[in-house]
Image (spheres, rainbow, N blue to C red):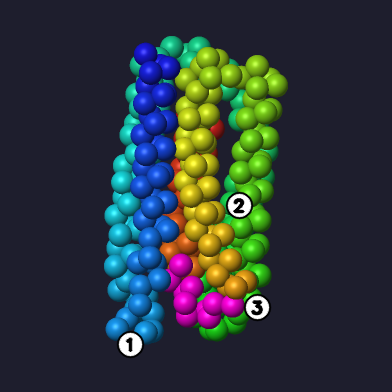
Amino acid sequence: MNTTFIFMALLAGVIVWILVVRRLTAKSWESQAPGGDVADIGFAPAKIGLAMFLAVVTSLFGLFFSAYSMRMHHGGEHDFAHFQGPKILWVNTAVLILASIAFERARSTVRKDQARDVKIALITAGVLTFAFLGGQLAAWQQLVAAGQVVSSGATVAFFYLLTAVHGLHLLGGLFVWGKTVGRLAGGAELIDVRLSVDLCAFYWHFLLLVWLVLFGLLLYT
């Protein structure tokens, strides 16, 4: 039963991730107004669309968290007594916070037409995000080395599941980030990527919030 649930939950996460990535890479991110200028960022349909997709993702993680809570209250103590969160998770959390700050910096500077600062902020955000994902893999390796595998208990199983789905969403965001950085490197004007930067920042802030809730749930329950 546990294996089936984990497989179905992971499959659902992958499906939602694919839908989000398709939305993030849609042309509507760079919607053009009739006169050739980029449509008003504040009322961009893509922003509303992204918010709707993130609402679905929020529901998905909410189901995961609810399932974890139910398993915790109805399962035996052996399910939760053996999990020790690797200390590197604290470092990973700090790195993801810095990545979110870097995206906010890019969002701020793109409005001021500071091309050099936008590029630096975007590259910094991407590098930090890759570092976070690398740190998550290192956490997995530490758990495996300590004998904490999926079958070790509910907490460990949920840790692998939730971090995997969260990581997939970050990878989807990095695909969009790469396209944005590539356009800037190709000589695109800041106004042409302003909407993409704005939505990337929103997306990263959301995933940071999800991670903070996830981190707290797993380590303090």
Q: Which residue is mark 2?
A: 129
Task: Report the number of numbered marks.
Answer: 3
Task: Give the camera-side residue of 182 and 84.
Answer: 182
Q: Earlier in the sequence, mark 2 or mark 3?
A: 3
Q: Residue at x 33, y 58 (%)?
A: 51
The residues bearing labels 3 and 1 have C-alpha atoms spaced at a distance of 27 Å
Q: Residue at x 39, y 31 (%)?
A: 11
Q: In the image, is residue 195 part of the stretch drawn in magenta?
A: yes
Residue 58 visible in rendering = no
Q: Which residues are magenta?
A: 187-196
Residue type of the residue flagged with mark 2: Thr
Q: Earlier in the sequence, mark 2 or mark 1?
A: 1
Residue 64, relative to residue 50: is it above or below? Answer: above
Q: Which mark is residue 35?
A: 1
Q: Residue at x 37, y 13 (%)?
A: 1
* Label 2 environment density (alpha carbons within 10 Å; few <14, some 14–19, many ≥20): many
Of discs 2 and 1, which sits in the foreground? 1
x then y, percent, for residue 91: 67, 45
x then y, percent, for residue 152: 55, 15
Residue 179, relative to residue 195: is it above or below? Answer: above
Secondary structure type for disc 2: helix
x then y, percent, for residue 156: 53, 23
Q: In the image, is residue 47 part of the stretch drawn in magenta?
A: no
Do tag 2 and tag 1 residues touch (Cβ < 8 Å)?
A: no
Residue 37 visible in rendering = yes
Q: Which residue is mark 3?
A: 116
Residue type of the residue flagged with mark 1: Gly
Q: Is residue 115 left or right of residue 15?
A: right
Secondary structure type for disc 1: loop
